[in-house]
Amino acid sequence: MAVTRRTSRDIRSESRLDVMHALLSAGAASRGELARATGLSTATVATVVSDLLSGGIVTEAGLTNGRVGRPTTTLRLNGDRGRIVGIDVAETYIRAVVFDAALDELASAEVAVDEHHGEADYVVARLARALEDALERAGAARDDVLGVGVSLPGGTQRPAEVSVVVPNAAWRHLDRLRERIGLPVVVDNPLKAIATAELWSGEGRRHSSMITLNLGTGVGAGIVLEGAILRGARNFAGEWGHSLLALDGRRCRCGRAGCVEAYVGAAGIQRTLAGIAPEHPLASEPMQREFIGALASALARPSPDPAVTETLERTARYLGAAIADLVAIVDPEMITLTGWTVWALGDHLVPAVRRRVVEEAPGDAAAELAIEVSTVRGNPVATGIATIALERFLGDMGLLTSRVPTAL
């Protein structure tokens, strides 16, 4: 097996990323502060900062007067360098978010998607609409855009199955997507996007090995090992939602029986409720996000009905068991949860899941494991895929040479 050797260019590339991460975390910092935050030598930081200043990625924010000595120059990421767009294409919506080059959110737009209407032209047209609306709200011209990141789920259906994941068709027609957008585009899946967001803007800045779980219509895991995103041979790593939870269990939309997603995806949670109380009014709610929102509202009542409480308890048991398997395999320092199901149910779900993971994990593997709702603000998929687009732009500039994503 070939071993990839890191060159001096790759090491310098990693140092640039370290400095950018530190600036993103601090907002502004001096060269000395960056050296302390990154562990790099002052000489390396000086060289890296010079590279980033030359590329317009970093700018001088002013002078800071210390107690002794000369004033020091404060640096920050240069948000005015251009605009980056992250687009989260999900089964029920498409959300486009415009960021400046410092990854500060400027504006966003969302369009609804019919989860039963999956033609490529339909998806691409809705995506283009969200992009144009977001740029207009941000007051950004197309010439300002350094890159567009598009997150597309799907790709897990067996060939014989009828795809029920709306964006799958777009994966098969990326040429149409590129032509319609007419801007530099990079495409990845949401699991890599959420892991990237966590690395740049969340707990990944403090933990080198962690897992971010995304819960919504589908479920999956963004896995970070020793500071790098686990992609696998074909970029499919993290499809935890299609690992086995129950032998001969519920039929999953991927065609397999007993997948994790069939129990803790939004539709799976509704199936749990329907199994407990078939006549419950929420059991027949046709829209997934509305169902999860109504379930959260019911749980928040002083005396929630027993069927709702039992649904949460069973979901926590399913999710806890599935996470315990991940803990046994990956041994992460921390697990964060994100996605619209977590945003709605997290306060009720996470404590119960945490207890279950400790019970289910082998030995004391989870005794000190932190399980929390992700601290990444806004839409983590859009944030992550925009960050991947920024990394691609930096690669095109020659500032990054390692782990640069492939663009369309």
Image: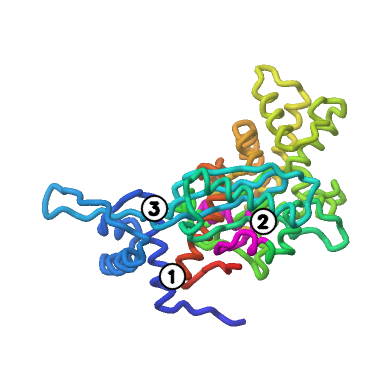
Q: CA distance from mark 3 to mark 1?
A: 17 Å
Viewer-side residue, 320 vs 182 = 182
Q: Earlier in the sequence, mark 2 or mark 3?
A: 3
Q: Earlier in the sequence, mark 2 or mark 1?
A: 2
Q: Report which residue position mark 1 lands on.
A: 397
* Residue 210 drawn at (x, y percent): 55, 54
For badge 1, the amino acid type reads Met
Answer whether residue 333 is visible to the viewer in this image: no
* Residue 152 drawn at (x, y percent): 67, 56
Viewer-side residue, 403 vs 212 = 403
Q: Give the vertical position of 337 relative to 394 (above or below).
A: above
Q: Report which residue position mark 2 lands on.
A: 152
For badge 3, the amino acid type reads Gly
For this view, does 124 lie left or right of residue 108?
right
* Residue 103 drawn at (x, y percent): 45, 51
Viewer-side residue, 190 vs 143 = 143
Answer whether residue 339 is visible to the viewer in this image: yes
Name of the residue lying farthest toward the top: 302
For this view, does 249 lie left or right of residue 16?
right
Range of magenta residues: 177-198
